[in-house]
Image (cartoon, rainbow, N blue to C red):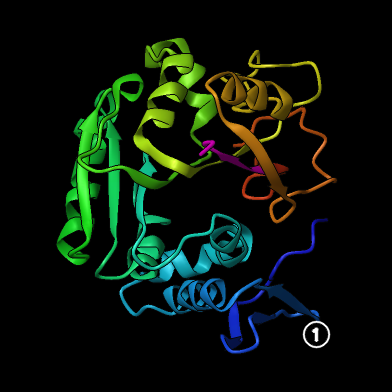
Amino acid sequence: MRTILKTTLVIAAALAASGCIIIANDGGGQTVITSTSPASARADTRAAMALSDDRRPEEDRARDSLRMPLQVMVFSEISPGDHVADIRPEEGYYTRLFAPAVGDEGRVYAFVPTRTAEREKPYADALAETYGNVVPVVGLLDEMRFDTPLDVVFMSQEYHDFHIPAFGVDVARMNRAVYDALKPGGLYIVIDHSGRAGTGNTEVQSLHRIEGDFLRAEVEAAGFVFESASPALANPDDDRTVSVFDESIRGETDQFVYRFRKPG
């Protein structure tokens, strides 16, 4: 089974001066994330502090052991002052982390697709009431617009859904809209449940999985450069043949975490 934090995630130290963050885990080991500059060290420290923000509900904290939020945030290069769009945040797990991480000088757009707005817009409104730097936005995914150029567009476990015909999304146009929304050099972070090689987008509705190479090719076709992948959510014991909602694998699916950059 994938090595995960089986108990509450504990921030043992955030050492901005030395540029590393150490996370203690229940196995007695440590996960060390090393920054490359004082600026990124400060950003990493802000990410660590976001995990302990007292506005986070207990149900979010309970999910930390599976979602590896510190590793994901550091990989996503979320920094103070950033303007970030969280695409279809639903209840707001990541929005609640991004808001304190970007700080008062930053902004987080909670982008709710028009199709799911009746149910999900109230979540975004509640997030804005709690965090002064969160801005709810409702719109079509393939026509998304923001009032300022973005540093990061973040999409977790949602991309595959937008290939389901009922969503009515032109995914190629969506990726281009993300590209246009970003500053030159901006990042597009995509997390999703891994499908088997060769399955493409054929199991997005039945298993809620998508093949990583297929997704990567789609995003690159919009003009993005694939920069890196993180193993933070990988699980080699998931054979990727059952639905992500199957109790045998739910919460522990093999997931890819991709970072794409807009040239410039």
Q: Which residues are magenta?
A: 257-264
Q: Position of residue 206 (x, y in %)?
A: 61, 19
Q: How many marks?
A: 1
Residue 11 or residue 166, whichever sits in front: 11
Is 196 displayed left or right of 38 in the figure?
Answer: right
Identify the residue at image location x=59%, y=18%.
Answer: 221
Q: Position of residue 169 (x, y in %)?
A: 40, 15
Residue 253 shows in this picture: no
Is the magenta region chiefly helix, strand or loop? strand
Classify mark 1: helix, strand or loop.
Answer: loop
- Few, some or many C-alpha atoms within 10 Å of disc 1 (few <14, some 14-19, many ≥20)? few
Query: As displayed, is residue 37 above or below residue 248?
Result: below
Query: As displayed, is residue 131 above or below residue 235?
Result: below
Residue 168 or residue 59, whichever sits in front: 168
Identify the residue at image location x=41%, y=71%.
Answer: 58
Q: Which residue is mark 1?
A: 28
Residue 96 or residue 34, whichever sits in front: 34
Is 246 displayed left or right of 63 in the figure?
Answer: right
Q: Position of residue 146 (x, y in %)?
A: 24, 37
Residue 127 shows in this picture: yes
Q: Position of residue 137 (x, y in %)?
A: 21, 39
Is 223 displayed left or right of 238 in the figure?
Answer: left
- Image quadrant assignment for residue 115: top left
Name the quadrant of the N terminus.
bottom right
> Is residue 263 on the magenta stretch?
yes
Q: Which amino acid type is shown beneath numbered disc 1?
A: Gly
- Image quadrant assignment for residue 6: bottom right
- Image quadrant assignment for residue 94: bottom left
> Is residue 85 on the magenta stretch?
no
